Image (tube, helix red, strand yellow):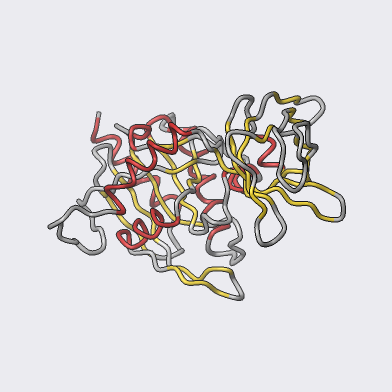
Amino acid sequence: MKLLLLCLLCFSPTVLLADGSWSFSGVIRSVDKDASKIVVAHDGIRGFAEEGGELELMVGVGDYKIAEPESLIKGRLIEKEGVLSLENIWPAEPEAERSMMLINRDLTRPRIGAVSKGILRVGDDLPRFAMYNQLGDLITPEQWENKAIVLNFIFTRGKVPSMSPATADRMAELQKKLQTAGLADSVSLVSISLDPEFDTPGLCYEFLDKRGINHEGYWMLTGSKKTLDYLTKQVGVVVAPSEKTVLNHSMVVLIVDKEGKIFHRIPGTRWKLEDVYNRLEVMLRGWN
């Protein structure tokens, strides 16, 4: 299902791509929830619309649900059989982009003389990094300060039942269990996309929303492929393209304490919700 989007295309020139789509950035001026539309105007699209005006565009459900007035976005404009659609939509706020770049720089550009420790082990610090969550918000290390973290890697196109779908389902169940126990505010649940070139915030939102999760307590993060590659290398997750399953990959669950140190790691796909919950409960009890 797709919904209508009216967008303002401004601040950067629109570029015709090789596949016949247009790359652009723009500002969403207003969101009409009742009419299922986002209303804006563009300054002109070279080779498509020379003068400014309004566009009526189709967008995915997740993209519509997280759209906010006055947000700067970038995406890919597509025309197919007379229908215009907007795909691959990302936040494009300059301040957020700069913050993300500065935080991830230390991860992707190791300092001269720094010695690699290999795969992270229990007791090691979780690397500092920044990505967008499924709401289009930039998530930085400050957002999970003084919280435990349960972290793993999945992707929305993952169809192997025991891999990404099962992990997301268990994380949703874990969130409910933490909420029932009154522990949800002390734990950040985080799944990082292994497919950031496809998994936009809107697609991540749609993927998790089907599971009835609280979007403020369980985040699916996506962003720079370079940042992801460094994270998977340090955590020890192996990823390779696959014709049958999009990606072949290993899996690991990390439990991180409030000081940012790895408390426990669980390799493989068969991690049990009760095991993770019990370890969290023991760790949280020790903080009180």
Residue lying at 20% horizontally and 51% vertically, measured from the top left: 123
Which residue is nearer to you in this view: 53 or 261? 53
Query: With respect to residue 9, does 84 lie above or below?
Result: below
Farthest residue to the bottom: give it: 243
Query: Left of 86 or right of it: where is 119?
Result: left
Query: With respect to residue 147, does 270 lie above or below?
Result: below
Residue lying at 35% horizontally and 56% vertically, measured from the top left: 231
Residue lying at 71% horizontally and 25% vertically, measured from the top left: 31
Residue 33, located in which quarter of the rendered image?
top right
Residue 244, located in which quarter of the rendered image?
bottom right
x and y percentages locating residue 71 in the rendered image: 59, 29
Query: Left of 196 or right of it: where is 8?
Result: right
Q: Total marks drawn?
A: 0
Residue lying at 35% horizontally and 52% vertically, measured from the top left: 254
Query: Left of 252 or right of it: where is 93?
Result: right
Which residue is nearer to you in this view: 208 or 17? 17
Which residue is nearer to you in this view: 99 or 172? 99
x and y percentages locating residue 53 in the rendered image: 78, 31
x and y percentages locating residue 125 in the rendered image: 23, 48
x and y percentages locating residue 140 in the rendered image: 38, 37
Query: Left of 46 or right of it: where is 285?
Result: left
Farthest residue to the left: give it: 113
Which residue is nearer to you in this view: 216 or 199? 199
Rendered-image quadrant of the C terminus: top left
Residue 267, located in which quarter of the rendered image?
bottom left
Farthest residue to the right: give it: 82
